[in-house]
Structures are given as structure tokens and as C-alpha cells.
């Protein structure tokens, strides 16, 4: 087997394509593989598939996977055929690259695999290509995969926002709670994002009226958008978000009381963690403050927080009565931040108690959000929300990226 036959076998070329010659430039570390076909070869018409002879050709070059540490390029006369079935004149699709790309499918498959695990700029450095070209590859395959995505079975959705850039910039994520994947990502966190999701859902074979359950925070904008664009959806307010609001109220009590009680300094996480999650050092602080027997206002707020958390351990038929008792205690606590959050909870209690029926929450979104923020941190941010959305779909969208080779 000579070198041409060896490279032909390695590239998996089938007739009429064959390796014509190979050249290697030691000085530049570059391998060039020239492909050709015998005179009189037939190629399938790109429109109807009828075998046709080449009408004319044009020279093309594609970047291929490195040969060891050396850059490799494929060159070929790309034929055009004039179909006998009146399809017109068309450029033949070559088997090693997609139409319009300057890279082979194997090179693009490597780029997509790397882009899932590292920033696009890092991929560009490794393969020695400008990151703009890498973004074009990633965006092409993500867009193509999303175009053929089927959302016809979506009935339970989680929605949450994640920071996209500094300065109160957000992207809203809509997640299929059953399939645990991102369906849609869009800039903003208002009612319009829900309308945009409903339109995108319909474009992918889904039905906004088939969505029966949505997990969300207590944002007025999300609630308004869900009512308008997902008319049959019952909203369950995410229990983790609700507990976080109570945590914030406890911390506000601590910050106010710390002004006259310096022993509360550096105790923030003692009050925000559950006892079983405290570190050894935090347990020492817990014991020093004698939280169980303390007359501190923060200690009272802490006990109210623990009691509220226990709501979600109650039997469904007793949850409403339990919440009513908690509300009475909280609103008579003489702790303004606790009173305020208790009134917020009472206002939204139907959506909070719906958890006992739906059982859904945004725990999946919290995990997805952590992956998104980790990717954003590694990339040191993205130049646009479009790029961020593309990466979100790539890493947590469970997309079908065929026809890329595996």
C-alpha cells in the first residue's frame, strides 16, 4: 500500500473519490492531501439523486484534523452537475464536509466536542483558528439541532433567570422538567419572555395549551406571562425560592440587630444553614450564641425559618392549617422583615401549596444554572446573549448533533 492508498483508507473515501497526491512541508509543519476523481465519473444530483457527469469544477480547500502535531488540509476539484431531469446546475455535496464550510466534518466534530467542555476561545487556541470561525461552527450545529427538535410532549415546565452579564442583565431559561433539558433561552426576565417561549414551543411542535404545570419564582412578570401565554398551566411557586425569601428576612433581622449586638458579627451562615449542615467552626459559634435559649431577635427569626421549612414535610391535607399557624406566629413576631415576608407568602400561598399536588420545583434549574455559570466563568463572559444561549443549548439542551461523525 503506497501513501496515497494509505491516506485514502484513513479518510474512508469511496469511489469515485481518490487521493491523487500528498505533500508535506517540514518547515511549516503542514500536510496537504489532494483529492480527485477519474475523468467521466458520475455524481448524484443534489436535488433528485440521478447520476450525472461533472459539468465543470472549482478548487476548494478544507481544514482537516491534525496529522500528529501538523495541520492537515484537503484539496479537491469540486464538481458541478447539470441534471438530465431538468433540476438545473448544482454543486455536488462532498462526503467529507458540509456545504459552505471550510472544515471537514471530523474537524467540526472535534470542535463541538471540545466546545462542550471549554471556552470557545480556548478551542480556537488549541486548533489554531480564530474564535469567530469556531463560533460559526458551534452556532451552525446548535441552530440545526434546535430546528429539528421535537417539543410535542412538553407538559411540565420550569422557568428561572440566570445572570448573563454585569449590570442586571439576565437570560430566562425554560426547562422541560420531565426530560431535564433546556427548551428555550432568551434575554430578559419579563412577561415577554414567556410569550417568546410559547411561540418557540409551537414552532417545535409543542402546544402552549398542553402545558399544565409551571414551576417559577414569585415574579409578577413571570406570573403575568404564564397566565397570558400558557393559559392551562397551574403555577407552583418554587419552594427553594420561597425558603430563600425567608432566609433573606432572617439575614435582614441579623444585620439590623448586629448594630447593637456585636456578638452577631461573622455569624451570617450560622443562621442561614440548617443545623445538620453547619461546619465545626459554625457549631462553635452556634453554641457560643446559645441560639436555642437566646433572647436575640435573630434567634426568634431563625426558629420561624426552621418552622417554615418544615411546611414541606407535612401531609398534604394538613399543609394549609400548618401554614396558617405559621403565618399567625410570623406576623405577631414584632420582626418587620419576618412580617413582610409572611405577608408575601400569604399573598402567594395557593401557588406555594400547589407543590403538594404537583411535586415540581426548580431544583433542576438550579443545577442547570450552576453549569451555565461555571461555563460563563471559564469563558470570562460572552460577547452577546446570542453566544450565551448557544452554549446553554449545547451543554444542557440535550441536542441531537447528527450528522456529525462520532
Image (cartoon, grey):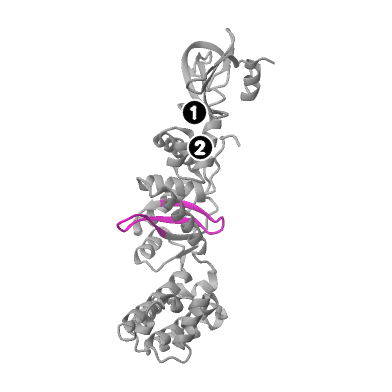
Q: Mark 2 sits on what residue?
A: 111
Dominant SS of magenta comes to: strand
Task: Kindly indicate the quadrant of the structure image that contains residue 39.
Answer: top right
Farthest residue in the front direction?
27
Q: Residue 257: x, y in percent? A: 33, 84
State the residue at coordinates (56%, 35%): 404
Q: Residues within 10 Å of mark 1 (few under 14, many from 20)?
A: many
Mark 2 or 1, nearer chain start: 1
Tag shown at residue 103 = 1
Q: Residues within 10 Å of mark 2 (few under 14, many from 20)?
A: many
State the residue at coordinates (42%, 87%): 300
- Bounds of the magenta segment: 161-185
Q: Residue 361: x, y in percent? A: 50, 66
Q: How many marks?
A: 2
Which quadrant holds the N terminus?
top right
Q: Are marks 2 and 1 in contact (CB under 8 Å)?
A: yes
Taking the image as drawn, is residue 265 in sight? yes
Tag shown at residue 389 = none
Which quadrant holds the C terminus?
top right
Give whichever of 212, 399 is nearer the camera.
Answer: 399
State the residue at coordinates (50%, 23%): 29
Farthest residue in the right direction?
1
| Mark 2 vs mark 1, CA separation in Å | 10 Å
Farthest residue in the top direction?
39
Give above or below for 401 relative to 91. below
Give whichever of 159, 26 is nearer the camera.
Answer: 26
Q: Provide the secondary structure element on which disc 1 rests.
A: loop
Q: Residue 194: x, y in percent? A: 39, 57
Q: Residue 269: x, y in percent? A: 44, 75
Per the image, is 70 magenta? no
Amino acid at each position: 500500500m503506497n501513501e496515497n492508498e494509505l491516506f485514502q483508507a484513513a479518510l474512508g473515501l469511496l469511489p469515485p473519490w481518490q487521493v491523487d497526491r500528498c505533500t508535506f512541508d517540514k518547515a511549516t509543519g503542514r500536510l496537504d492531501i489532494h483529492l480527485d476523481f477519474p475523468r467521466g465519473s458520475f455524481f448524484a444530483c443534489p436535488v433528485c439523486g440521478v447520476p450525472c457527469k461533472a459539468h465543470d469544477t472549482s478548487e476548494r480547500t478544507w481544514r482537516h484534523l491534525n496529522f500528529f502535531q501538523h495541520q492537515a488540509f484537503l484539496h479537491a476539484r469540486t464538481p458541478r452537475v447539470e441534471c438530465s431531469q431538468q433540476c438545473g446546475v448544482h454543486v455536488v455535496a462532498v462526503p467529507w464536509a458540509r456545504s459552505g464550510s471550510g472544515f471537514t466534518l471530523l474537524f467540526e466534530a472535534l470542535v463541538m466536542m471540545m466546545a462542550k467542555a471549554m471556552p470557545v476561545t480556548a478551542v480556537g487556541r488549541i486548533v489554531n483558528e480564530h474564535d469567530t470561525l469556531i463560533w460559526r461552527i458551534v452556532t451552525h450545529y446548535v441552530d440545526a439541532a434546535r430546528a429539528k427538535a421535537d417539543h410535542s410532549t412538553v407538559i411540565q415546565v420550569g422557568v428561572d433567570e440566570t445572570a448573563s452579564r454585569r449590570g442586571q442583565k439576565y437570560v430566562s431559561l425554560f426547562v422541560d422538567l420531565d426530560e431535564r433539558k433546556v427548551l428555550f433561552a432568551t434575554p430578559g426576565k419579563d412577561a415577554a419572555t414567556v410569550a417568546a417561549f410559547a411561540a418557540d414551543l409551537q414552532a417545535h411542535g409543542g402546544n402552549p395549551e398542553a402545558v399544565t404545570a409551571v414551576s417559577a419564582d414569585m415574579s409578577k412578570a413571570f406570573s403575568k406571562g404564564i397566565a397570558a401565554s400558557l393559559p392551562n398551566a397551574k403555577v407552583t411557586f418554587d419552594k427553594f425560592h420561597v425558603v430563600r425569601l425567608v432566609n433573606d428576612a432572617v439575614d435582614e433581622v441579623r444585620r439590623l440587630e448586629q448594630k447593637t449586638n456585636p456578638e452577631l458579627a461573622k455569624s451570617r451562615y450560622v443562621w442561614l444553614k440548617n443545623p445538620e449542615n453547619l461546619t465545626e467552626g459554625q457549631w462553635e459559634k452556634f453554641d457560643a450564641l446559645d441560639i436555642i435559649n437566646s433572647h436575640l431577635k435573630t434567634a426568634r427569626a431563625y426558629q420561624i425559618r426552621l418552622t417554615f421549612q418544615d411546611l414541606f414535610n407535612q401531609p398534604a391535607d394538613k399543609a394549609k392549617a400548618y401554614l396558617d399557624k405559621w403565618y399567625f406566629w410570623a406576623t405577631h413576631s414584632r420582626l418587620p422583615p419576618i412580617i413582610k415576608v409572611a405577608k408575601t407568602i400569604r399573598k402567594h400561598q395557593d401557588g406555594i401549596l400547589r407543590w403538594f399536588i404537583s411535586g415540581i420545583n426548580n431544583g433542576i434549574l438550579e443545577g442547570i444554572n450552576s453549569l451555565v455559570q461555571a461555563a460563563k466563568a471559564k469563558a470570562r463572559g460572552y460577547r452577546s446573549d446570542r453566544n450565551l444561549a448557544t452554549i446553554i443549548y449545547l451543554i444542557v439542551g440535550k441536542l441531537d448533533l447528527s450528522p456529525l461523525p462520532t
